[in-house]
Amino acid sequence: MIRYWIFAGLCCIACSAFADDGVVLSPEEAIKVAHQCSRISPGPLQGTWQPTASQIKKLEMELPAEFRRASQAQTRFLEIRNLTEEESELRLAHYVRQYAGLTVGKRNIIYVNAVQIEPAEKPWRTKAVLICDGGPSAFGVEYNPSTGAFSNFAFNGAI
């Protein structure tokens, strides 16, 4: 199953909506999401920028394969180590995603902050969600829209 994201336009100055489970964070919130407590954070941070809908769509088309690769490569969380392609895509569908346009070094990256929360649970559409520990219930990954490459995929630390 491939998930397609449709740009829904600006929902407010703070965010742009992508389907029901992804948003581009405001510059202020993007900076906050770049400071994680139990996984690697992007840096050194030099600024923010606004990703486009087409960049997010391309990222999302490639994210399922990257999620599966990272799940298989990690050794801490056995429940996600041997997921099939279908299981991996189903599990990924349970994460809401925050996209932060960050300038790291001289590169513009899109940092994906993905968390398994009920959409109504937190104001995740406008506020950076920071979860310490939690294991595979949250992950982050950097995406370079210029090259289409992912890097620094990390699940949160164990509970």
Image (spheres, rainbow, N blue to C red):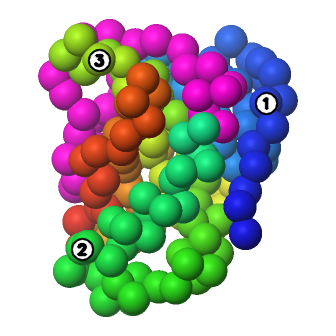
Q: CA distance from mark 2 to mark 3?
A: 26 Å
Q: Amino acid at mark 3?
A: Arg
Drawn side of residue 142 relative to residue 26, left or right:
left
Drawn side of residue 37 relative to residue 136, left or right:
left
Residue topped by disc 1: 7
- Please report the residue visible at 22 percent of the width from the left and 55 percent of the height from the top: 38
The quadrant the N terminus occupies is bottom right
**Residue 71 screen position, x and y as percent:** 36, 73
Q: Secondary structure at mark 2?
A: loop
Residue 123 visible at all:
no
Residue topped by disc 2: 74
Residue 52: quadrant of the picture:
top right
> Which of disc 1 and disc 3 is earlier in sequence?
1
Point out the frontmost of discs 3 and 1: 3
Circle number at residue 107: 3
Q: CA distance from mark 2 to mark 1?
A: 32 Å
Q: Start and end of the magenta stretch?
A: 31-57
Would you place residue 69 above or below residue 7 in this image? below
> Which of disc 1 and disc 2 is earlier in sequence?
1
**Residue 53 screen position, x and y as percent:** 68, 26
Q: Residue furthest front?
A: 147
Q: Is residue 43 magenta?
A: yes
Q: Secondary structure at mark 3?
A: strand
- Please report the residue visible at 55 percent of the width from the left and 78 percent of the height from the top: 85
